Image (tube, grey):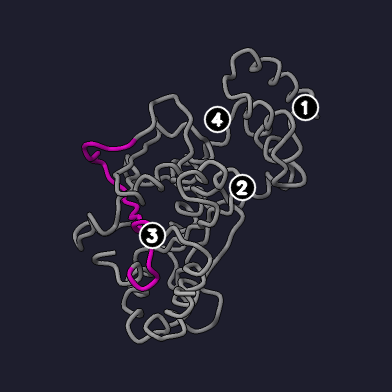
Amino acid sequence: MPGCRIAEAIRLKHKPVALHWSDEKPENVVQFDKGSWGCVMFLVVAAAKGKIAVLDRDTCGCVGGAVGMGFGNRYPDFPGGIDCFYHFLSSGNEKWEAGREEIRKMEPFVSRKEFLDHYAHGEGYKKTPGLVKDMVDRMPMMEIPKRYVIFKPLGDTFTEAEAPVTVTFLVNADQLAGLVVLANYGRPGFENVSIPFVAGCQAVGILPYREAKSETPRAVVGNIDISARFYTRKALGREMLSFTVPFAMFREMEENVEGSFLTRTQWSNLLET
């Protein structure tokens, strides 16, 4: 990938994705329609394939995605309210009266039957609604200081004057292994990478945003979100995970490529077998 040593060294298939905050919206962008639903990971994939993608508070129809991109705590906007979200992610809303009433009210109007099924029976990602509440309470909610989140192909748009907030790589297992080793290469210790249980968008958004504030930021591995993996599988294949770093850490890793294991035969042999 021109201009990115890491991408060249790991033979990245898709372009690295730069995430920017801006009050200005570029032209000719991919963007969801206002009031429609769309997985934020679709926009990450679009940027990895060479397009510019944008979203803001008005065009981020998924409440988890809005949280993930830094548009505040949007879980109270979930159909039926935040308690229904706690049940949605766990055991389902058919198991309590308020939830059953919400199912009855929305059933005639919901076009996405898959969503209604998950709403009623639960996604089973946490054992109980209380554990979902605990997770939400611990999430690093924030309001970004700009209107838009913009995803751009790093190699096409990066300049020092327009530094991204984070950089995301979409990688297979071997490439992920290389990035984990590189993230630890120039640092003390062995835990400079995190794999949290969060939505795919949250692993490229608020979790790396939080890491960017740390003196020793970590990388965040994502796309372990079962739903996001299902939605993006056609575009990415089954094997892809995301690896996101705050921009300062990206620069650190870029500088460490030369002289590291990425220039040794062990690495090239791995990629060629």
Picture quadrant of residue 149: top left
Total label count? 4
Marks 3 and 1: which is nearer the front?
3
Disc 2 residue type?
Ile
Q: CA distance from mark 4 to mark 1?
A: 19 Å
**Identity of the residue drawn at 38% across and 47% down:** 144
Marks 4 and 2: which is nearer the front?
2
Marks 4 and 1: which is nearer the front?
1
For mark 1, what is the residue? 94
Main SS of the magenta part reads loop
**Callout 3 secondary element:** loop
Labels 1 and 2: the sequence-earlier one: 1
Whether residue 170 sits left or right of residue 112 in the image: it is left
Part of the protein shown in magenta: 8-30
Q: CA distance from mark 3 to mark 4?
A: 37 Å
Q: CA distance from mark 2 to mark 3?
A: 22 Å
Residue 226 image offset from top left, x and y in percent: 61, 47
